[in-house]
Image (cartoon, grey):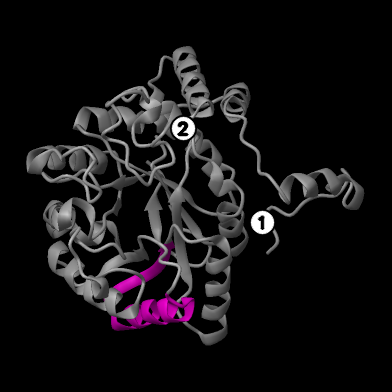
Amino acid sequence: MKYRLFGRNNGLRVSEISLGSGLLGTHEGIDGRSRPGEGVAGARAVFEAYAEAGGNFIDTAEGYQGGESERLVGELVGKDREDFVIASKYAVGSTRTEGHARVGNSRKAMMAAIDGTLRRLNTDYVDLYWLHAHDAVTPIEEILRGLDDLVRSGKVRYGGLGNFPAWRVSRGQALAERHGWAPIAAVTAEYGVAERGAEREIIPMAEALGIGFGAWSPLSSGFLTGTHPGTGGDEARLLHWSASNRPTPADLAVREAVGRVAGRHGATPAQVGLAWVLHRAHRSPTALVPITSAPTAQAMSSNLEALHLGLTDQDMAELDSAGGFTLGEPHVHNREGEKYVTADSLIRPVVPVA
């Protein structure tokens, strides 16, 4: 496992793959449909497989497993706390019965949530604290000022935003720069070969502003592995907020392409799905880190072999074209017009302009 700075706005060093801990525990996921966790022994085995491979970046949230995920992460990390980067999230509460004052993006919810998170993790700080979801009503000034206060208090090292539209992140970063608040260190959104919507605005914004990007559900909640064929009742594991919840013909075409590429390399579909994201990450001017997990230590070790799977240009072209993804407008129009305003002889900057 290699390491990289999580964006250009900080010196935080994270591993190439982050361990997602949404399935670490014994309860159902917060949506009531995710598969049950594997318990303490299973969680420890998955964690150890990840750590032994050099992984140091663990992503959790107050809402995962009703708070049990955070408790397990704290227990698993234990005395080696300083060797790991722990990220957690707030906004949805730790149970499905949280009152209105405890959910959303408000300062009140933020301050209550961080104290609960620190207690469950058995630590006095988290390295990265990001919002789990965008509530569309809390002013971005309130959010950024709250994160800045947490950074200054020492409870949080870096702040981030999860599943926010790019225009709100951009405005928030501008306000942080203007007022001297802690900058937005990272954003997160669903991203993988079967869900590429983040390429339209979120990823270009992160690359231009030097913000780290966490790609959650790079395997579309197991859809790419073929475990859940997208028919009947076998989709119970798929999260209702995942774009792969109801697979389309395009999604199925992507999965078939992943299977073909895996066959050529003697790899698993999971390895190909992760390798596709890593291939993109190696060519990005910011840090693009897939957040993934596995039900067993064996599966985790297998997935991490994606680090050594070199996809060819032919592989990438086949995977990219399988689902018929397009950037849409105004991107298509602008790309067509670029030849008239920049010409092919122009050397483009490595870092996109903001």
Whether 123 is drawn above or below 285: the answer is: below
In the image, is residue 215 part of the stretch drawn in magenta? no
Secondary element under disc 2, as helix, strand or loop, is helix
x%, y% of residue 296?
19, 32
x%, y% of residue 113?
23, 71
Mark 2 lies on residue: 275
Quadrant in the picture for residue 2: top left
Whether 188 is drawn above or below 251: the answer is: below
Which residue lies at the image location 36% right of the left edge and 22% below the top edge? Answer: 229
- Residue 5 visible in the shown view: no
Decide: marks 1, 2 in contact (CB < 8 A)?
Answer: no
x%, y% of residue 295?
21, 33
How many discs mark residues in the rendered view? 2
x%, y% of residue 23?
21, 43
Q: Which residues are magenta?
A: 138-161
Kind of residue sitting beneath label 1? Val
Drawn side of residue 283 relative to residue 12, left or right: right
In the image, is residue 155 part of the stretch drawn in magenta? yes
Mark 1 lies on residue: 351
Secondary element under disc 1, as helix, strand or loop, is loop
Which residue lies at the image location 61% right of the left edge and 49% below the top edge? Answer: 200
Category of crowding for the residue at label 1, using alpha-carbon neighbours closer than 10 angstroms: few (below 14), some (14–19), many (at least 20): some
Kind of residue sitting beneath label 2? Ala
What is the spatial separation of the Cα atoms under label 1 and label 2, in whole angstroms? Answer: 23 Å
